[in-house]
């Protein structure tokens, strides 16, 4: 991802273009640190026609914003 500065407790939304994705598909995902050193947690992923929207939350205390990149791994399941 790009370098993030998401405030503590706030969500960050990433939209990924994926021509195979369709509404109703199931998305499993996890997040890892890229260059970011602040706590992050996966929140929600939703597949739509041609894209997947990931929401990641800054899970750190109220004083620190995200400070770098993150990595998102996902599995798209066709029901």
Image (cartoon, grey):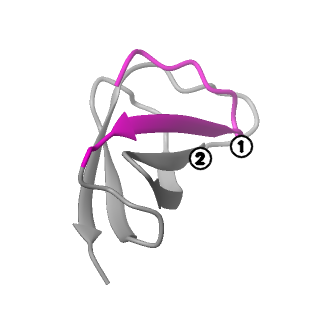
Quadrant of the rendered image containing residue 70: top left
Which image quarter holds the C terminus?
bottom left
Secondary structure at numbered mark 1: loop
* x and y percentages locating residue 61 in the rendered image: 69, 42
Magenta run includes residue 17: yes
Label 2, label 1: how many angstroms apart (C-alpha)?
Answer: 6 Å
Residue at (28, 44) in percent of width and height: 18
Check if residue 35 falls in the magenta segment: no
Residue count near mark 1 (Cα–Cα under 10 Å), binned few <14, some 14–19, many ≥20: some
Identify the magenta region.
1-19
Q: Earlier in the sequence, mark 2 or mark 1?
A: 1
Q: Which residue is mark 2?
A: 57
Residue at 26% x, 45% y: name it.
Answer: 19
At x 23% / y 64%, what residue is drawn? 75
Tell me: 39 left or right of 6: left
Contact, mark 2 vs mark 1 (Cβ under 8 Å): yes
Magenta portion: prevailing SS class: loop
Is residue 60 toward the left or the right of residue 67 in the image? Answer: right
In this figure, which residue is indicated by the disc labeled 1? 9
User: Quarter-wise, where is residue 22 in the image?
Assistant: bottom left
Q: Quick one: label 2, few (<14), some, or many (20+) residues within 10 Å?
A: many
- Where is residue 40? Give x, y as percent: 49, 46
Between 24 and 29, which is closer to the camera in this rendering? 24
Which one is in front, 34 or 60?
A: 34
Q: Position of residue 10 (x, y in %)?
A: 71, 39
Q: Residue 7: percent from the left, percent from the top?
A: 69, 28
Depicted 60 relative to depicted 36: above or below: below
């Amino acid at each position: 991802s790009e370098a993030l500065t998401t405030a503590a407790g706030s969500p960050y939304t990433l939209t990924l273009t994926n021509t195979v994705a369709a509404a109703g598909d199931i998305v499993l995902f996890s997040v890892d640190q890229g260059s970011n050193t602040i706590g992050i947690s996966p929140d929600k992923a939703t597949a739509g026609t041609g894209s997947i929207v990931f929401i990641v939350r800054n899970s750190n205390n109220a004083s620190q914003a995200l400070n770098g990149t993150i990595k998102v791994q996902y599995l798209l399941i066709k029901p």
